[in-house]
Image (spheres, helix red, strand yellow):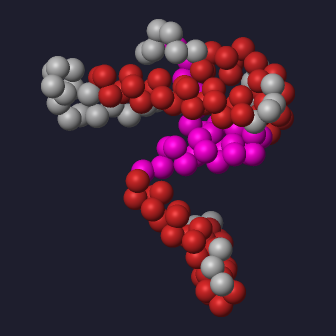
């Protein structure tokens, strides 16, 4: 996963390079933490990810992704693998970490509505059905 680097000038003139390194180290630490807290070995995580992704993922591959030495030349976790990892370890923490503050706010609103009293929850579920129906129809019209 490529870590976004800010284009805002830093006090030290590095044009966001320190922010990029900090963000990458933070992501690597979080990746290691969520895998550890899952209670699964990295070998078991790799095996299940391999099955779901249809390509080989090894324990060594996962170890390389969390290794923090030599940032910039180290292996980076593919963003496309984040949902699969979250499914395997049964945690959406990594996905949430990647969301912007605005999207986190919208997610929080949606979760509040989903856990609301029955009438509001039924209205929310009705809106979700309409959105899904619209997506299916939009997908058919593109063919």
Instruction: Report the magenta residues as a range.
Output: 74-100
Q: Nearer the viewer, residue 63 or 133?
A: 63
The residue at the point 57 percent across, 32 percent down is 30
Q: Is residue 112 above or below residue 105?
A: below
Relative to 17, 90 lies left or right = right
Relative to 38, 110 lies left or right = left
Q: Is residue 15 magenta?
A: no
Extreme residue in the top direction = 70
Q: Is residue 75 above or below residue 98?
A: above
Which of the 4 quarters of the picture holds residue 31? top right
Q: Is residue 54 visible?
A: no
Number of callouts in the render? 0
The residue at the point 75 percent across, 40 percent down is 89
Q: Position of residue 54 (x, y in %)?
A: 79, 34
Split into 4 quadrants, where in the image is the C terminus?
bottom right
Q: Nearer the viewer, residue 35 or 5?
A: 35
């Amino acid at each position: 996963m490529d870590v976004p680097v800010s284009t805002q000038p830093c006090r030290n003139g590095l044009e966001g390079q320190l922010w990029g390194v900090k963000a990458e180290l933070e992501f690597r630490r979080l990746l290691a933490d969520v895998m550890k807290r899952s209670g699964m070995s990295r070998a078991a995580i790799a095996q299940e990810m391999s099955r779901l992704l249809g390509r080989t993922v090894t324990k060594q591959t996962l170890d390389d992704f969390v290794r923090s030495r030599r940032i910039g030349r180290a292996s980076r976790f593919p963003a496309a693998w984040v949902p699969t990892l979250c499914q395997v370890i049964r945690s959406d923490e990594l996905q949430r970490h990647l969301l912007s503050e605005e999207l986190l706010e919208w997610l929080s609103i949606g979760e509040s509505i989903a856990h609301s009293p029955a009438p509001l929850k039924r209205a929310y579920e009705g809106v979700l059905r309409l959105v899904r129906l619209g997506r299916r129809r939009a997908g058919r019209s593109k063919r």
